[in-house]
Image: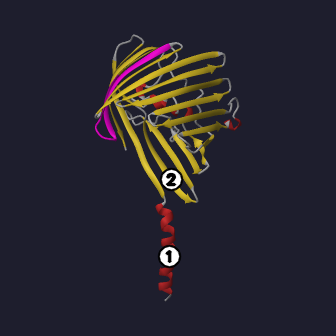
Amino acid sequence: MKKFTLSALALVAAAVAAPAFAQSSVTLYGRLNTTVETQKENGGARKWVVANNASRLGFKGLEDIGGGLKASFNLEHGFNSDTGVSTAGTTFWGREAWVQLAGSFGAVRLGSYTPESYFATADYISMHNHDTGSSEDALYAFAPWVKNNKVGYFTPTMGGFNASLSASLGEGAPGVKRAYDMAANYDDGPLHLGFGYSDQGNNNQWAVRGLYELGAFTLGAYYNVAEYGSTKYKAARAAVMYSLGASEFHVNYGRATNGDQMTLGYNYNLSKRTKIYGYYTDLDTNRRVARNGDFSSLAFGVRHNF
């Protein structure tokens, strides 16, 4: 009788716990994005390279707590697909590392995550290779670009509108100013609008973005203004994508205070997760720290999401 009672209690406990397990999930995901390129920089000789285009490996989870509350997290590691080396040195979760509590009030997020001002503007119109690799947007004013030690609030979506506000507290480190980031998005059918602003000490930047879907065409553009102390900087970019079956044809052109960049691209979607692509990009600017002066690349690549 005692054995039966214990078994019955175990079954009841399992039945009560089962819904909780069913309401939580953890997903492994990632991207491998690699190109073979012929590059030329500052008038030097052309060279062949195998290059990484922001490959990553991540975990994300979601738990339905009940009462309209949901807890979630995201851990994301960046690595070089051509060498296997981490892209962030000794920081393993260098891309994303945050926990979030969400409900009808919106969401509160704590940790390290990419500024939403970037997602709302420059990244949104980077359609040909998701703003990665040698054809990444070299003109957008990334500074101030603060990811760590952040607390943020995300509004619920109402009438196609949502917004976010975050602060990086600095934690009393000498010479480190608090950083603030805000973003707003509006989606109404084929029309998509965005605004982003970030500020830290004497550095700040803002940008506005628009994207419109017109049949097989997708048209996007942003305008960006930044101040670095007493120095002012402006940049703008326009992007066009034409879709034909599994094929995508891309053209984008950007112009900044002291340079410009042009990219032509072609993507062929083998599936929803895998594509092959090629592009030619030409950059002429002395703003970008990594590449001062002239740079061009003809690239062929494969991108696979899992």
Q: Residue 62 in the image: x percent, y percent?
A: 50, 53
Residue 261 painted magenta: yes
Residue 265 painted magenta: yes
Residue type marked 1: Val
Where does the magenta region start and end? Answer: 259-279
Q: Report if residue 139 is visible in the image.
A: yes
Q: Which residue sits furthest top?
A: 43
At x 49%, y 60%, the residue is: 23
Query: As drawn, is 212 to the left or to the right of 179?
Result: left
Query: As drawn, is 244 to the left or to the right of 165?
Result: left
Q: Give the CA separation, mark 2 to mark 1.
A: 25 Å
At x 54%, y 35%, the residue is: 185
At x 66%, y 16%, the residue is: 230
Residue type marked 2: Leu
- Residue 76 sits above or below residue 51 on the image: below
Which numbered disc covers residue 12? Answer: 1
